[in-house]
Amino acid sequence: MFDRLEDIIRRYEDITMMLGDPSVVSDQEKFRSLMKEQKSLEALVECYKEYKDTKQTIEDSLQLLDEESDPEMKEMLREELSDAKDKIPELEEKLKILLLPKDPNDEKNVIVEIRAGVGGDEAALFAADMFRLYTRYAERRAWKIETMSVEDIGIGGIKTVSFMIKGDGAYSRLKFESGVHRVQRIPTTESGGRIHTSAITVAIMPEVEDVEVEIDMNDCKFDVFRASGNGGQCVNTTDSAVRLTHLPTGIVISCQDEKSQQQNKAKALKVLRAKLYEMEQERKHNDEAQLRKSQVGSGDRSEKIRTYNFHQGRVTDHRIGLTLYKIDQIMDGDLDEIIDSLIAADQAEKLASVEE
């Protein structure tokens, strides 16, 4: 492990030197690539430097203890030595986690797709609530939201919505949200006061660049239609909305959020690219059974991952057995405790897999 860490330190120092080279600065593509690599190594380099500093503190404290005669100074050195020794196991564990293979998609923006499932109007109302939850979470992290398409049911519910979240590490934070989210509550449409169980599906897909997934335009069929909505320029007046059908897979995507056909077409292709990438990743995951075992949840949309019980005020994540009694805060976008727990569980699984 430490030989590898020394190699990473050397690489980090080489990158820092290259970034000061005028010939590299003038080559914007190379400069951006090196900046990205430097950023990806930063946390590991800082942690390793702290580890080495702590080890040096232990050595220095031991040496000074042998030389020191003053009782008060000796006591101070013993405390410093004890603190440093306690810190070493924590830093070693952190280094092991930072050395785990990184998901290449972690720093990407995400495309989120929410669909109402079983439960009729109540499922659509919950889909709208979840759209708000992720919007509020994005706001808390200063991420940007870009709506791509919405199909509502007219009573405040959403049948399906697709949107992009743009921000540093968006995929790394949200990737465990894929799956079935179940809600148990008394719907506003229920007159008898009975608790209903409904469900929605959430898909989290990394934004994919053109070079990562090549689309044959001969496989795409585009239809145009008039956008529908709450008004605004071009709504119901021009054929600006676009429906894209990918013939080989049967995937259908509608986009009507933008004012022009061209903009909606570009958005539809972006969603298609993400869906095709997701399908390929799922195929690879199915082929690699061991990889499945080292992940918290499969990301399969058919997997029930979480239950929101409004009557009891609790949210339970079934993959890690976490239950929190703060449903109001969570529905307002306070997701960090759940997400941090999922990331920690995933890292623990991967560490255990590496050490076996």
Image (spheres, rainbow, N blue to C red):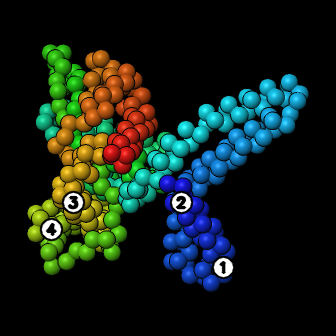
**Mark 3 or mark 4, which is nearer the start of the sequence?**
4
Q: Is residue 93 above or below residue 246?
A: above
Return the disc, 3 or 1, that comes first in the chain's sequence: 1
2 or 1: tag closer to the N-terminus: 2
Q: Earlier in the sequence, mark 2 or mark 3?
A: 2
Q: Secondary structure at mark 4?
A: strand
Q: Secondary structure at mark 2?
A: helix
Q: Nearer the viewer, residue 195 or 308?
A: 308
Q: Residue at the location (31% across, 32% down)?
A: 320
Marks 4 and 1, the one that precedes in the sequence: 1
Q: Can you identify the residue that label 4 sits on?
A: 246
Crowding near the residue tagged with mark 3, few <14, some 14–19, many ≥20 C-alpha atoms within 10 Å: few
Residue located beneath label 2 in the image: 3
Q: CA distance from mark 3 to mark 1?
A: 40 Å
User: Reading the chain from its start, which is encountered first: label 4 or label 2?
Assistant: 2
Amino acid under label 3?
Lys
Task: Answer few, some or many: residues within 10 Å of disc 1's Cα (few below 14, many 20 plus, some between 14 and 19).
Answer: few
Q: What percent of the width, then of the height, locates residue 123?
A: 19, 35
Relative vertical location of residue 265 with respect to residue 80 in this rendering, above or below: below
Q: Is residue 9 above or below residue 349?
A: below
Visible in this render: residue 304? Answer: yes
Q: Secondary structure at mark 1?
A: loop
Question: Residue at 53% across / 77% down in the picture?
Answer: 30
Q: CA distance from mark 4 to mark 3?
A: 21 Å
> To which quarter of the image does residue 16 belong?
bottom right
Residue type, mark 1 in image: Asp
Which residue, given by chain and number where applicable, does mark 1 sit on?
21
The amino acid on which the numbered mark 4 sits, given as a three-letter code, is His
Q: What is the CA distance from the residue labelled 4 to the residue labelled 2?
A: 49 Å
Q: Is residue 325 left or right of residue 9?
A: left
* Residue type at numbered disc 2: Asp
